[in-house]
Image (cartoon, rainbow, N blue to C red):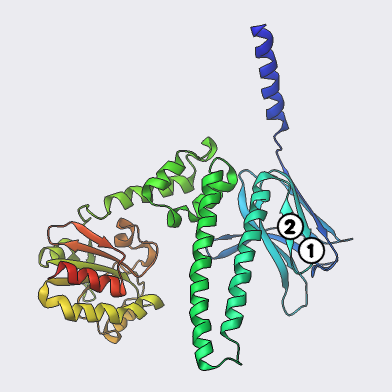
């Protein structure tokens, strides 16, 4: 009996393996009211950094279109419809998970597109519906805030309501992404969205716990190895850890070591910025104000620029009234200092005590002023 049971189990496993599709078929239909028309093109594309990569095109005929191919791994791609000769060539579109299996696309009225057919695309459709709902709420709030018939008082009230709506929708969107990733980390959909959004949604411990649950086929992917590397850096540069030293050149071409700046100040603010960064320039007056208020109490600042152009860097220092020390290797986002501190968005700050302990990170504006007041009494 045991041997017979083993044979049955083996047959079932073989059948399951055999049933796994090794290619994809995308079947699209155009329903009444859709802006997508016959004799136009359906285009599959993806983004690699800022570059658009075109994957395939299909002509729409008799209200139908189709794509076929093989997907080595599941990936998020975009489906766009191109009406040649129109002022707005891309009439509508959506994103879908390109994976082996039978995928359905239904183009309906009001630019609505329903996708499904595979687990990942059913989940993607659910996500699209929910995010579209949030976008609709935001759109309504924005229209109300820019209504030209409002009085000054009414407009101010609507603008406050818009800000509150934006904050609420942002939080709901974040919670939606988090729950979908957590619930589906064991499949390709959860893995894909974890790679895309996980580092910004989850802390170090949460990311490590999720990585432990991803499918074995993705465990050593380039993306996961990169996230693991970032997590190690994040742990090394967390609040309470000793700072990581590095050396770069000043605008005058002399070498400056971070540890030299840290040693001579009660507190040192490492400010990652760039001349081309709008938010950095907008924040700089606050940093200038804090420097003037706290430099005699022991605050030192060293700016780490992610510039590529030395002259633009020097001009920005002059234009923004920056009086503290500056350093850069002029490698832009490849900056060694940015790499050592896992900097992927600027402005970013690291606050270091004289004994070399990191005491705070990513403080700006009022939060930075409050922390400096607390530590430099």
Considering the numbered disc 2 on the image, is that residue within a helix, a strand or a loop? Answer: strand
Q: Is mark 1 on a helix, strand or loop?
A: loop
Q: Can residue 20 be seen in this view?
A: yes
Determine the residue positioned at 52% across, 77% down. 162
Q: Of all residues shown, which one is farthest toward the top?
A: 1
Query: Which mark, by number, is residue 114?
Result: 2
Q: Can residue 249 be seen here?
A: no
Q: In this view, does 294 lie above or below 241?
A: below
Q: Position of residue 78 (x, y in %)?
A: 65, 60
Q: Residue 363: horizontal and vertical position, in percent?
A: 30, 67
| Quadrant hosting residue 324 | bottom left
On the rendered image, what quadrant is the C terminus found in? bottom left
Position of 245 with respect to 84 (left or right) is left
Q: How far apart are marks 1 and 2 (CA)?
A: 8 Å
Q: Which mark is residue 108?
A: 1
Circle 1 packing at 10 Å, graded few (<14), some (14-19), many (20+), is: some
Above-or-below relation of 272 to 122:
below
User: Position of 10 compared to 37: left or right?
Assistant: left
Q: Are marks 1 and 2 in contact (CB under 8 Å)?
A: yes
């Amino acid at each position: 009996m045991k041997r017979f049971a083993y044979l049955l189990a083996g047959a079932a496993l073989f059948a399951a393996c055999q049933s796994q599709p090794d290619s994809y078929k995308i079947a699209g239909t155009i329903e009444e009211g859709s802006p997508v028309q016959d004799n136009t093109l359906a285009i599959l594309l993806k983004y690699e950094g800022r570059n658009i990569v075109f994957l395939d095109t299909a002509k729409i005929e008799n209200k139908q279109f189709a794509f076929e191919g093989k997907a080595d791994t599941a990936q998020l791609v975009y489906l766009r419809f191109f009406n040649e000769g129109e002022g707005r060539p891309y009439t509508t579109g959506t994103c879908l998970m390109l994976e082996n299996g039978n995928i359905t696309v239904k183009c309906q009225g009001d630019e609505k597109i329903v996708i499904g057919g595979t687990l990942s695309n059913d989940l993607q459709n659910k996500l699209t519906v929910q995010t579209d709902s949030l976008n609709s709420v935001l759109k309504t709030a924005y229209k109300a805030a820019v209504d030209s018939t409002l009085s000054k008082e009414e407009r101010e009230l609507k603008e406050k309501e818009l800000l509150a709506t934006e904050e609420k929708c942002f939080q709901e969107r974040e919670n939606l992404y988090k729950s979908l990733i957590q619930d589906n980390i064991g499949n390709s959909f959860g893995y894909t969205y974890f790679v895309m959004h996980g580092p910004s949604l989850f802390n170090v411990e949460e990311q490590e716990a999720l990585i432990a649950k991803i499918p074995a086929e993705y465990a050593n992917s380039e993306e996961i190895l990169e996230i693991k590397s970032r997590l190690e850096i994040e742990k090394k540069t967390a609040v309470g850890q000793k700072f990581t030293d590095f050396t770069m050149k000043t605008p005058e071409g002399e070498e400056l070591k971070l540890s030299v700046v840290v040693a001579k100040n009660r507190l040192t603010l490492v400010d990652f910025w760039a001349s081309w960064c709008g938010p950095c320039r907008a924040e700089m007056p606050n940093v200038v104000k804090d420097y003037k208020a706290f430099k005699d109490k022991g605050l030192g600042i060293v700016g780490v620029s992610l510039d590529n152009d030395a002259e633009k860097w020097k001009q920005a220092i002059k234009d923004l009234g920056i009086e503290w020390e500056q350093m850069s290797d002029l490698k832009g986002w490849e900056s060694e200092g940015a790499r050592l501190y896992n900097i992927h968005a600027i402005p970013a700050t690291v606050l270091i005590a004289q004994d070399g302990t990191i005491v705070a990170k990513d403080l700006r504006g009022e939060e930075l002023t409050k922390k400096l007041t607390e530590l430099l009494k």
